[in-house]
Amino acid sequence: MKAAEVVRNIVKEKLKRDEVVASMTVRLSRGVEIARMAKTAGFDMIYVDLEHSTLSLDATGQICLAALSCGIAPMVRVPANTPEYIQRVLDGGALGIIAPGIGSAEEARAVVRAAKFAPLGERGAGGALPHLEYRSFPTAEANAAVNDATMVIVQFESAEALDKADEIAAVDGVDMVLLGINDLLSSLGFAGQHENPKVREAYARTIAACRKHGKHVGVGGLSTKPKLAAEFIAMGARMVSTGTDIQFLQAAMNEKAAQVHQMVKG
C-alpha cells in the first residue's frame, strides 16, 4: 500500500470535481461525537475554530482524529499564523489550516512554509502521523502524500487583502480563499451590512483572482443569509461555511421552547 492510498482529503477531491463543499464550525463541542454527527448530517468538512473559542489543542486533536476515522475532512482555524500553532494542529490530525487575517502574499507564503514539508515548505518532521494511520512509509513518499492532502485556506478579512487578492491567490500552496465577510465589512466601514454592494464586489474580485490562478473561494459569515450564499456559489464559490455548533444548538433550543409556549397559548 502506498502512502497516497492511505491519506485522503474529501474536500480536495470534491473541489477537483468542481463540486460544492459543505462545512460547519466547531466552537462549543469538546467531544469527538461532533465529528460523527457532522458526517451523519451530510457535511464534507468541519473546522475547529481556535481563533474564537477556548478549545484546547488536545480536544482539537481528538476531534480531528474522529473526523479522519469517519471520513469527514478536519480543518483548524489557528489563533495565530505561526509555525508553533500550524505544525501542532497538523501533526494532531488536521488535514488543513485556515489562516485568519491574511493581508499579503508574503503572509500567505509564510503559512504555506509552515504547513508543507520540503520542498514546498519547512514543516518539521514529527514521526508517524494519524493521517497515515501511524503506518511507516519512506519519508519522501509520506511527505509527498501528506503535502498533497493538506490544504492551506487563507482568510480575507480586510480591504488590504482585497486589494492584494491577485498576488495572494497566486501563491503556490494556497488552495482556497475564505471570505470572512463580517470582519471585512467592518474593515470597509459597513459593519453588518450583508446586502451592501461591497459584498458582491468583494466576491466578484476574489473569485476572479482565484479562477485566474486555479484556486477556490469559500463563503464565510453568511450563515443567516442563505440566498446570498447561493448567489456566490452561482458566481463560482465552492465552499460554504454554514455556521457553528453553537448556532445550530441555540436555533434548535429556541424552536423547541417556542413550540411549548405556543402549546400553552393554544
Image: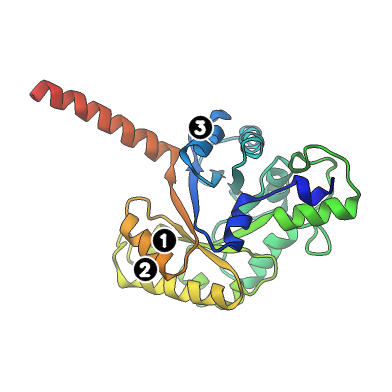
Which one is in front, 86 or 252?
A: 252
Q: Is residue 122 left or right of residue 180?
A: right
Q: Kindly identify the amino acid type of the residue bearing the numbered disc 1.
A: Ile
Position of the C terminus, as image quadrant, is top left
Label 1: state its secondary structure. Answer: helix
Please give the residue where the numbered disc 2 appears in the rendered image: 199
Q: Is residue 144 left or right of residue 210?
A: right
Looking at marks 2 and 1 on the same chain, the residue that comes earlier in the sequence is marked by 1
**Colouring used for the render:** rainbow
Residue 200 picture location, percent across and down: 37, 71
Looking at marks 1 and 3 on the same chain, the residue that comes earlier in the sequence is marked by 3
Q: Among all residues in the image, which is located at the extreme top? A: 264
- Image height of 50 relative to 20, above or below: above
* 3D distance between C-alphas at marks 2 and 1: 7 Å
Q: Kindly identify the amino acid type of the residue bearing the numbered disc 3.
A: Ser
Please give the residue where the numbered disc 3 appears in the rendered image: 29
Label 3: state its secondary structure. Answer: loop
* 3D distance between C-alphas at marks 2 and 3: 31 Å
Please give the residue where the numbered disc 1 appears in the rendered image: 181
